[in-house]
Amino acid sequence: MINHIVLLKISTEVGHAQIQAVFNALENLVNVIPGLLSFSGGQNNSPEGISRGFTHGFHMVFKDSSARDNYLPHPEHEVVKEMIGKILSDCSEPVLVVDY
């Protein structure tokens, strides 16, 4: 299995409905992308104070690296990436991705 972790810095000007639409679209990818087994995500609520400006995150589990690799260029993933791009902060590094 491949775990795909994505952290986002979402602009403070973006409303809850727009953020929820992005997370709904991400969750729907489980029904569209072969080998994408699960999705979870939401707003950061850690009390530790070390989020470095990341406001939201999500986690996806893929069957294997091949499923993850097929997801990356998938047309439905491209649509969601565009949605995400519209809500990100304009800072220099608004996204962090780690796979393991």
Image (cartoon, rainbow, N blue to C red):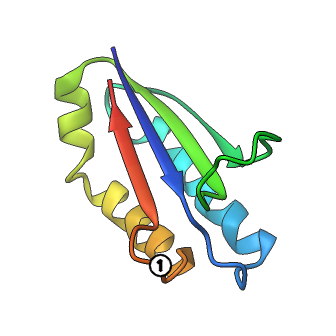
Residue at left offset 47%, top offset 33%: 60
Vertical side of 65 occupied by 98: above or below: below
8 vs 2, nearest the viewer:
8
The quadrant of the image that shows the N terminus is top left
Vertical side of 3 occupied by 56: above or below: below
Left or right: 91 with respect to 48? left
Residue at left offset 20%, top offset 53%: 73
Query: Given the image, on which type of amino acid does mark 1 rest?
Result: Cys
Q: Which residue is under mark 1?
A: 91
100 vs 30, nearest the viewer:
100
Residue 83: percent from left, percent from top: 49, 72
Residue 82 is drawn in which quadrant?
bottom left
Q: Residues within 10 Å of mark 1 (few under 14, many from 20)?
A: few
Residue 27: percent from left, percent from top: 57, 44
Q: Inspect this view and state whether residue 33 appears.
A: no
Residue at left offset 59%, top offset 56%: 52
Q: Secondary structure at mark 1?
A: loop
Residue at left offset 57%, top offset 76%: 87
Residue 84: percent from left, percent from top: 49, 68
> Most extreme residue toward the top, as rendered?
1
